[in-house]
Amino acid sequence: MAALLLFTAATAQTTGFNDNRIIAHRGAWKNTGHPQNSLASFRAAAEMGCHGSECDVHLTSDDSLVVCHDLKHGGMLIETTPYAELAKVPLKNGETIPTLRQYLARAMKQHGTKLIIDIKTPRNAARATDIALATDKLVKQMGADEWVEYLAGYLPAIEALRRVTDLPVAYLGRWRDEVPEMNPDTVKRRGIKYIDYEDRHYLAHPEWVDALRRQGVHLNAWVVNDEERMDWFIERGFDYITTDEPEKLFDKYAAKAGK
């Protein structure tokens, strides 16, 4: 397995987990045929040897935590729909839309791949804080802390998490559009130590990489699927690289290790 050829970032949370920098985006789905954010896609990422597998979490109208990327499932807005209604619409492989409890239970059956939980921002953005706190409460109840790291784009949710957990909480910045809060100076003032920006932002501001690294910030980039971009982030020693194509990224690292 190519994962054995990789080396670990000094700041990565790797104790007992696979020693590489590869995070499968919504699980390993693109080349496996599994639905994104399914239990099957997590299992495939774990079997592949990824250090982490990212998943997206929403809160239903009856306060159930479910794993899904989009704001809607089966045409239903998740934040205004009870879980029982969402569960009537299966994923394309027949799975019921997974709850976070099911996802955590599956992750805890192995000890190689972390679960990187993305706290989604719903239409009612303030509810992202509720999602964050409910997620952390469940993680603690299940004793799953060792398997979990967090991502969030809503800064109040990040601040709420940082008050209740010592687990890594990465700031996602803004998708596509740059905002002042993403600047390294603002990151430093806020005391943020984990970043997971979309790849385009690093490419537009390569000077940010060194600035953030001098601040001791753990660097992740998403979603890195292009081979030239993979090379760019590998050469700069990113702590994590999130990709829809972990197989390709494993091959990249293996080729560089063989030189």
Image (tube, helix red, strand yellow):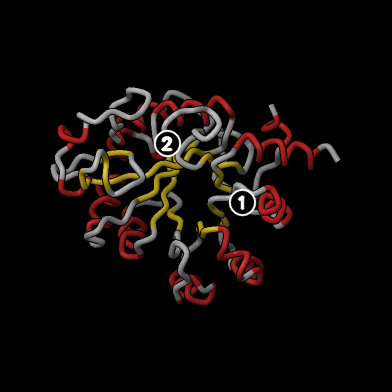
List x then y, in percent, for residue 122.
27, 55
Mark in the foreground, 1 or 2: 2
Q: Is residue 56 left or right of residue 192?
A: left
Residue holding disc 2: 36
Q: Position of residue 211 (x, y in %)?
A: 62, 71
Which one is earlier in the sequence, the residue at label 1 or at label 2?
A: 2
| Image coords of residue 179 (percent x, y) | 44, 73
Q: Nearer the viewer, residue 3 or 214?
A: 3
Q: Quadrant of residue 169?
A: bottom left
What is the CA distance from the residue labelled 1 to the residue labelled 2?
Answer: 23 Å
From this view, report whether residue 43 is shown above or below residue 119: above
Please report contact status of discs 1 and 2: CB closer than 8 Å, yes or no.
no
Q: Residues within 10 Å of mark 2 (few under 14, many from 20)?
A: many
Amino acid carrying label 1: it is Asp
Give the secondary structure at mark 2.
loop
Q: Relative to 225, does residue 203 appear above or below in the rendering?
A: below
Task: Find residue 39 and report its image quarter.
Answer: top left
Q: Could you tell me which secondary element the residue under label 1 belongs to?
A: loop
Looking at the image, which residue is at 45% across and 76% down? 180
Q: In the rendered view of the protein, which quadrant contains the C terminus? A: top right
Q: Quadrant of the N terminus?
A: top right
- The percent coordinates of residue 124 (x first, y second) are 22, 60
Q: Is residue 178 left or right of residue 221?
A: left
Q: Read off the residue under disc 1.
A: 239
